[in-house]
């Protein structure tokens, strides 16, 4: 029996979590998957109910889980809060040592027309952004916010850089064997260290090709020639920005999932986007990002390849048929999209 802890969070988090759980129930029924879910407060919802975005009970439940699903956190109502929902997210990633955030981007031929970019540019794009998730400027000390100045600190140890690069190279070995290491080594000390260690790690993986790119120019190349990329490995902040940028390639932020892996085998799965306060509570959010995150969990945490693939292929097939939420120019509601996915799974 696999125990899944669900953290719906804020904004559209609850809506898309419900969607993913409905699809999971159907696929679990079809393949006789033995799993159980429990829900916990997290983010702004936890601030409201417990005064803290990551209550002890939520963290303890996560530590005892076989897999964690997270919707999204944050929203304007907590902007002035003493501890913001975002701090709960960072604290959870740190507490569970979830250092490797894997953000796949893929554009099958059948959905290439959904991109605002030309189909001949995006068709067949298939890469992963491997984002370091527990270091860099997000966590560096000291940090200060004063009236007239402010300070953030970007730090990386060689060990932190080495483990994320090794993770990315291992992923590349199972793919097209091209690693693009992204840094700002023309300016930043952390990036100079990053580049040196990338060369060292590359020598451990002679079957994988390593190329270096500066983050500014790769931001352009990503949009100009997305089919070039296979595995992009980068530090925390660059990975955050590049992966949101990359969502333009398939057409919307609303379909990109992610997996965050730690050291002890526990992983968390969440969309790359946020709580989308501008569309929350209207049943119009695209649930695909959360459904695909759930599918990644079935595959990567539980080894359930066939159900994971069926969920992924069904989502893309439904989109290819023109069943589209507003972010992709359609009028389908969140719940109608989920119904279409469930119907197709049950009919197959
Ligand atoms: N992992 C997380 O929980 C996470 C990630 C990013 C941002 N946030 C938080 O979310 C809040 C809102 O941030 P933001 O507005 O800058 O970014 P956002 O990702 O929430 O939204 C950006 C834009 O994308 C749209 N969008 C996002 N997901 C969508 C979906 N599934 N379907 C349709 N449209 C979708 C939104 O409507 C919005 O127009 C902030 O508090 C931020 O800190 C949380
Ligand atoms: C909400 C925020 C802290 C978070 C991040 O920057 O990591 C988000 O943008 C993400 O990509 O998961
Ligand atoms: Mg982000």
Image: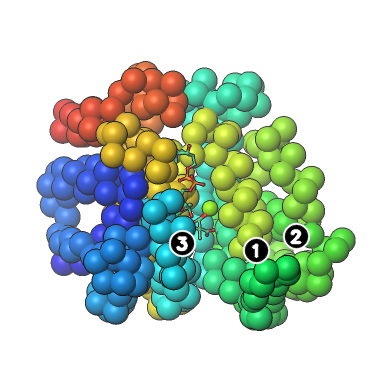
Towards the viewer: 154 or 168? 154
Dot 2 crowding, Cα within 10 Å, few <14, some 14–19, many 20+: many
Which numbered dot is residue 183?
2
Do the numbered discs 1 and 2 sit on residues whose CB atoms are within 8 Å? yes
Query: Along the horizontal axis of the image, is 291 left or right of 173?
Result: left
Residue at the image point whose x is 79% and y is 45% from the top: 217
The N terminus lies in quadrant = bottom left
Q: Secondary structure at mark 3?
A: loop
Whole-percent x and y of residue 179?
Answer: 68, 55
Task: List the residue tagged with mark 1.
Answer: 235
Towards the viewer: 260 or 149? 149
1 vs 3, front mark: 3
Whole-percent x and y of residue 38?
Answer: 18, 63
Task: List the residue tagged with mark 3.
Answer: 80
Q: Earlier in the sequence, mark 1 or mark 2?
A: 2
Dot 3 crowding, Cα within 10 Å, few <14, some 14–19, many 20+: few
C-alpha gap between disc 1 and disc 3: 28 Å
Residue at the image point whose x is 68% and y is 35% from the top: 223
Whole-percent x and y of residue 191?
Answer: 77, 67
Q: Is residue 42 above or below residue 221?
A: below
Q: Secondary structure at mark 2?
A: strand
Q: Earlier in the sequence, mark 1 or mark 3?
A: 3
Q: Earlier in the sequence, mark 3 or mark 2?
A: 3
**Taking the image as drawn, is residue 348 in sight?**
no
C-alpha gap between disc 1 and disc 2: 7 Å
């Amino acid at each position: 029996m696999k125990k899944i802890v669900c953290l719906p969070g804020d904004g559209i988090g609850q809506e898309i979590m419900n969607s993913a759980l409905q699809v999971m129930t159907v696929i679990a029924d079809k393949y006789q998957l033995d799993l159980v879910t429990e829900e916990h407060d997290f983010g702004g919802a936890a601030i409201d109910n417990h005064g803290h975005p990551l209550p002890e009970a939520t963290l303890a439940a996560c530590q005892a889980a076989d897999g964690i699903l997270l919707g999204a956190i944050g929203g304007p109502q907590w902007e002035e809060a003493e501890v913001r929902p975002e701090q709960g997210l960072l604290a959870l990633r740190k507490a569970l040592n979830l250092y490797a955030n894997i953000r796949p981007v893929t554009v099958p031929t059948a959905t290439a027309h959904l991109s605002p970019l030309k189909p001949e540019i995006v068709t067949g794009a298939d890469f992963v952004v491997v984002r370091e998730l527990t270091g860099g400027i997000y966590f560096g000390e000291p940090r200060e916010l004063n009236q007239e100045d402010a300070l953030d600190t970007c730090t990386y140890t060689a060990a932190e850089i080495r483990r994320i690069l090794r993770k990315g190279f291992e992923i590349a070995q199972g793919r097209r064997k091209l690693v693009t290491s992204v840094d700002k080594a023309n300016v930043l000390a952390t990036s100079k260290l990053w580049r040196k260690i990338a060369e060292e790690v590359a020598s451990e993986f002679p079957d994988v090709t390593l190329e270096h790119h500066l983050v500014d120019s790769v931001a352009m190349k990503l949009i100009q020639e997305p089919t070039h990329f296979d595995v992009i490995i980068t530090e925390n902040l660059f990975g955050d920005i590049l992966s949101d940028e990359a969502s333009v390639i398939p057409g919307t932020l609303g379909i990109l999932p992610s997996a965050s892996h730690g050291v002890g085998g526990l992983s968390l799965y969440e969309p790359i986007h946020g709580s989308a306060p501008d569309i929350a509570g209207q049943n119009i959010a695209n649930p695909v990002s959360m459904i695909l995150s759930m599918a990644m969990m079935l595959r990567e945490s539980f080894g359930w390849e066939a159900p994971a693939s069926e969920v992924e292929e069904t989502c893309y097939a439904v989109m290819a048929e023109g069943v589209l939420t507003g972010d992709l120019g359609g009028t389908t509601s969140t719940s109608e999209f989920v119904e279409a996915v469930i119907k197709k799974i049950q009919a197959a």
